Image: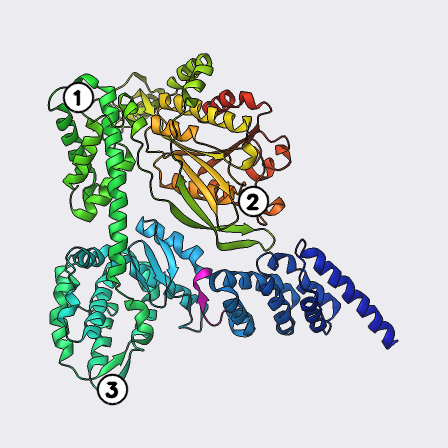
């Protein structure tokens, strides 16, 4: 009987080994490695082996070595917890692998009780990857800034990225460690608001000055400067986020009390008292009386002199999490880069606005001094809109009573620059006026661009998560997307397209011109075009009841400007070669011509893929960029490239749309086939990741739509985009006109 059961077990083990080989196809692992693992698995009951092997298809595509390590450690895992937790354990393993590689993942699996079961019991610490999905929306909402997280031993910031420890286990309760992460993030935001980085980083960047060199004990000076900043920022947070401080006060006090003396003396206890004063609500001397604007650098010499008289030394320990690191060289680089980007964006937006005004009132701006007067009026309005007392006011800013509204995006950008410099730098303004005055953004100067193409922007790379439906989680920072710019090419393509579609284009232009404004009836006005019957009836009722009736008894007809931002994402995979590519380019030409009539803000980008490490997005037209010969030449340069990895470009353009000021945000994908790439991005995996990227877009208020010429589109597009969010065009030649009509229907 014993031999019978042993024989049956051998058959079952052989079947499981065959299923293992089937799940890792098309790869063929070394048989001796598989045999070695299955010899160890033979000691497990058959149903537990099935549980372990069920996750092979998820781990194997990520890393073969990780898969073998998982099977080896899985036997130990099943002695500590039930098989139902294996999928969750695998999810954590893959998360660690994507952050720390194979070595980190093996270390995670080596101590299952501490690293996996402990946090599930509410014990031990918490990792940055676990809390970032909660903390990132929190700090972006509180600060109004598009911040990012990155890992570092000591907390800090460069004003764009907040650096946090990968793991915190200062308290036995998980909730307290999560709260500590939240406090640290808030403190680093407070450091940005305090202006310490802008103040000292500017000195170090421009003059090479390092004020901390003046102090003999530089380490003490750094700690005291961080302590002064902590006191200052803590008071700021107590006023701005009192709920957070109520919850985090005790945690901060406990960490500060862990500052330990290294040698005998009073310096350690003095530092503890110094840091505990704002937590206890005590008067903090000059900081409290002089307010938020007092510079910590001005207070440092006095505080340093007091502490240098005290004997002894100390070890910050966990309190260093609260004080963080003031890395000024790192901040100086980030500030310089941000200012450069804001300068370029502001000049382009202001030049576009002045150019639009010049087109609308050409007679007035040609008069001597009128352009300068208009520019002066714009600057006055921008300064007024950026005033602190108008921070919450959402007003319509009109120029010269001519109905020209200054774009909200330009006002918001001006606020950031004025907050940074105190005023709009004259160099920014003069450059924008020169561009607008020289006709650089007007149609009249397009001929000059043919011989002098605009310089291409520097390529940028971005990292994006990718959804793995098999494990029900994201692969963190899995894809690298590179944003490039197509080199303009001289071609008669655009002129030929305009000639080919001359008659339908005239009709389309007329239709789009009618979409420029929408009528809206505003009720309960003191004066207007008609009587508001509802308001009149209420006023009569109030009068008879003895109340003073309202005088808002009229309706008024208002014309609202459209506020739409659209992104067109065009498939540039190799399958678009031939007539498909020509039809796509003709479509973009007709779209651009029609959208110029209606005035919608729009961007055009092409995409292609070649593995997760090389997803490409090709800039053809940014939303704030004027449509001219350079954009036309980029459209003519569109050509088939590699494969169709849709997830990263969809996520990237979603972020661009979120940064726009459009009330209606559209993402229109034009493709000839289903998502697919050279690596394992194919089939259901690619479809589910694309669907997840589209759901993410919908979740933040972006409306995606797809236009395809794939005959099998109905098999997968309804699942990816949702019903009624896509259209199939069966005739490639009809694509240009049909797409323009579709856009009109989507936005009217």
Depth check, mark 2 against mark 3: the one in front is: 2
Depth check, mark 1 against mark 3: the one in front is: 1
Check the image and report above or below for 14 versus 555.
below
Q: Is residue 393 visible?
A: no
Depth check, mark 2 against mark 1: the one in front is: 2
Q: CA distance from mark 1 to mark 3?
A: 75 Å
Q: CA distance from mark 2 to mark 1?
A: 53 Å
| Left or right: 723 as drawn, with respect to 219 | right
In the foreground, 384 or 253: 384
Check the image and report above or below for 121 versus 600.
below
Q: Percent position (x, y) of residue 593? A: 39, 22
Q: CA distance from mark 2 to mark 3?
A: 62 Å
In the foreground, 287 or 408: 408
Q: Which residue is mark 2?
A: 677
Q: Please tell me which residue is depicted at 71% across the width and 69% down the height of the picture.
A: 35
| Left or right: 246 as drawn, with respect to 641 | left
How many residues crowd mark 3 within 10 Å: few (<14), some (14–19), many (20+)? few
Q: Which residue is mark 3?
A: 263
How many residues crowd mark 1 within 10 Å: few (<14), some (14–19), many (20+)? some
Find out whether residue 128 is within the magenta segment. Answer: yes
Q: Which comes sooner in the sequence, label 2 or label 1? A: 1
Q: Please tell me which residue is depicted at 58% across the width and 38% down the height of the picture.
A: 674
Q: Percent position (x, y) of residue 152? A: 37, 65
In the foreground, 484 or 73: 484
Q: Which residue is mark 1?
A: 365
Residues in magenta? 121-129
């Amino acid at each position: 009987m014993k031999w019978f059961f042993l024989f049956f077990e051998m058959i079952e083990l052989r079947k499981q080994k065959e299923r293992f080989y089937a799940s890792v196809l098309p790869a063929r692992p070394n048989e001796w490695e598989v045999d070695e693992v299955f010899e160890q698995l033979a000691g497990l009951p058959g149903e537990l082996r099935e549980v372990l092997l069920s996750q092979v298809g998820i781990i194997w595509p990520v890393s073969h070595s990780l898969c073998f390590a998982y099977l080896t450690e899985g036997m130990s895992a099943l002695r500590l917890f039930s098989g139902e937790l294996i999928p969750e354990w695998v999810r954590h393993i893959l998360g660690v692998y994507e952050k720390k590689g194979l070595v980190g993942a093996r270390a995670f699996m080596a101590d299952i009780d501490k690293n996996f079961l402990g946090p599930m019991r509410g014990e031990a610490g918490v990792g940055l990857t676990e809390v970032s999905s909660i903390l990132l929306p929190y700090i972006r909402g509180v600060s109004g800034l598009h911040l990012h997280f990155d890992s570092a031993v000591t907390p800090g910031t460069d004003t764009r990225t907040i650096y946090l420890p990968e793991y915190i286990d200062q308290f036995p309760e998980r909730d307290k460690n999560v709260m500590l992460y939240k406090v640290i993030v808030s403190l680093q935001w407070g450091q940005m608001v305090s202006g310490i980085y802008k103040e000292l980083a500017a000195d170090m960047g421009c003059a090479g000055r390092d004020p901390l060199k003046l102090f003999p004990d530089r380490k003490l000076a750094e700690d005291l400067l961080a302590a002064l900043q902590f006191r200052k920022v803590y008071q700021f947070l107590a006023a701005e986020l009192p709920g957070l401080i109520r919850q985090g006060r005790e945690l901060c006090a406990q960490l500060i009390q862990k500052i330990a003396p290294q040698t005998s003396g009073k310096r350690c206890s003095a530092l503890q008292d110094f840091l505990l004063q704002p937590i206890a609500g005590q008067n903090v001397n000059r900081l409290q009386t002089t307010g938020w604007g007092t510079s910590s650098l001005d207070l440092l010499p006095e505080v340093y002199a007091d502490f240098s008289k005290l004997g002894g030394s100390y070890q910050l320990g966990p309190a260093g999490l609260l004080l963080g690191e003031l890395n000024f060289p790192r901040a100086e680089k980030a500030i310089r880069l941000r200012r450069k980007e804001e300068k370029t964006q502001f000049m382009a937006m202001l030049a576009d606005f002045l150019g639009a005004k010049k087109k609308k009132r050409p007679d007035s701006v040609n008069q001597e001094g009128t352009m300068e007067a208009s520019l002066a009026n714009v600057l006055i309005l921008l300064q007024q809109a950026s005033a602190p007392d108008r921070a919450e006011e959402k007003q319509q800013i009109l120029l010269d009573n001519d109905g020209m509204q200054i774009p909200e995006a330009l006002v918001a950008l001006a606020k950031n620059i004025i907050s940074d410099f105190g005023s709009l730098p004259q160099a920014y303004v003069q450059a924008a006026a020169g561009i607008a005055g020289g006709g650089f953004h007007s149609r009249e100067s397009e001929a000059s661009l043919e011989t002098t193409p605009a310089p291409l922007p520097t390529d940028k790379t971005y990292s994006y998560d990718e959804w793995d439906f098999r494990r029900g989680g994201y692969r963190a920072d899995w894809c690298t997307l590179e944003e490039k710019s197509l080199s303009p090419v001289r071609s008669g393509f655009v002129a030929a397209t305009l000639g080919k579609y001359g008659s339908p284009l005239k009709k389309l232009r007329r239709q789009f011109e009618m979409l420029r404004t929408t009528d809206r009836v505003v009720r309960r006005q003191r004066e207007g075009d008609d009587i508001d019957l509802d308001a009149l009836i209420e006023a009569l009722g109030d009068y008879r009841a003895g109340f003073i009736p309202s005088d808002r008894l009229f309706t008024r007809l208002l014309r609202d400007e459209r506020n739409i931002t659209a992104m067109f994402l065009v498939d540039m995979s190799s399958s678009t070669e031939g007539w498909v590519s020509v039809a796509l380019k003709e479509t973009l030409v007709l779209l651009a011509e029609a959208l110029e009539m209606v005035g919608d803000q729009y961007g055009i980008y092409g995409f292609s893929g070649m593995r997760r490490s090389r997803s490409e997005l090709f800039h053809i037209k940014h939303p704030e960029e004027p449509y001219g010969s350079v954009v036309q030449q980029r459209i003519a340069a569109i050509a088939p490239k590699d494969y169709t990895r849709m997830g990263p470009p969809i996520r990237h353009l979603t972020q661009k749309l979120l940064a726009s000021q459009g009330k209606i945000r559209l993402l229109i994908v034009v493709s000839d086939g289903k998502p697919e790439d050279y690596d394992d991005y194919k089939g259901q995996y690619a479809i589910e990741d694309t669907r997840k990227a589209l759901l993410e877009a919908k979740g933040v208020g972006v409306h995606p739509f797809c236009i395809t010429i794939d005959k099998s589109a109905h098999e997968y597009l309804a699942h990816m985009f949702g019903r009624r969010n896509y259209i199939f065009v069966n005739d490639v030649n009809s694509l240009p006109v049909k797409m323009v009509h579709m856009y009109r229907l989507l936005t009217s």
